[in-house]
Amino acid sequence: MVDIENHEYRVMDKDTSKLTIEEVPFQEKEIVHLKDTISALRTELEEFQFAKDKAVQEALASKSGEIEQLKVTAQALRDELENLNYKKDEDVQKAKADSKDEIDQLKKTIQALREEIEEVRYNGEAKNQETIALFNDEINQLKSTIQSLRDEIENEKFEHLKLLQKKEADTAAEVRVLQQSAQALRDELDKLS
């Protein structure tokens, strides 16, 4: 004869190790939470990219202003050079003085100033390129992190689905066992009757 009380205790003890139907919504809530986290990360990435782009634009605007100022300075130097050349010619005509050394010195000064302007312009452009490259590297790292999180979430979804399917299969098998046990008990009761 089958021990009904002990059999039911063993079935109930086995049920506690299985995923119940009531626990499924918790898994769904966890998936929703993970989706919300990804959405928040995407928003944070977009805000970060916007801030970085704005900083680059401001840096470029600042350098553009500096370049324009240098152009104005160069034009002023050219004007000054023209005035000096005019004055030199006037002095030559008036005094017939040899001012070759002074003219050469002025030309060297102008050349040095032009080279300095070019160096400042080059350094400014190089700095902008370096800043943009750093921003792009950081953005790419964030994109890589987001992709890793997406992959991890997809793996979690897949594992959860496998687990849920296994639990459903185990539950169905257990139901069949219980049905068979119940039928066996009925048959035994019928025999006893």
Image (cartoon, rainbow, N blue to C red):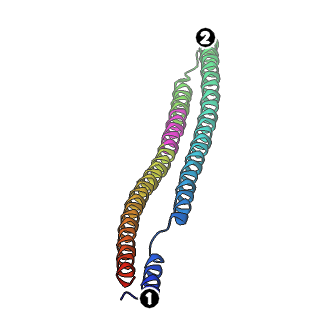
How many residues crowd mark 2 within 10 Å: few (<14), some (14–19), many (20+)? few
- Does the magenta segment cover residue 122? yes
Disc 2 target residue: 93
Residue drawn 35% across the image and 77% down it:
187
Percent from the top left, x then y, of residue 37? Answer: 57, 54
Q: Which residues are magenta?
A: 117-132
* Residue nearer the viewer, 136 or 172: 172
**Rendered image quadrant of residue 98:** top right
* Identity of the residue furthest to the top in this view: 93
Disc 1 target residue: 6
Please tell me whether mark 1 sits on a helix, a strand or a loop: helix
Residue drawn 40% across the image and 68% down it:
175
Task: Identify which amino acid the numbered label 1 is placed on.
Answer: Asn
Task: Identify which amino acid the numbered label 2 is placed on.
Answer: Gln
- Does the magenta segment cover residue 166? no
What's the CA distance linking mark 2 and mark 1?
A: 128 Å
Percent from the top left, x then y, of residue 174? Answer: 38, 71
* Identity of the residue furthest to the front in this view: 193
- Left or right of 69? Residue 17 is left
- Left or right of 172? Residue 145 is right
**Rendered image quadrant of residue 50:** top right
Q: Vertically, is 88 above or below 70? A: above
Q: Vertically, is 44 above or below 25? A: above
* Residue nearer the viewer, 39 or 155: 155
Q: Majority secondary structure of the magenta segment?
A: helix
Residue drawn 55% across the image and 59% down it:
25
Percent from the top left, x then y, of residue 172? Answer: 38, 65
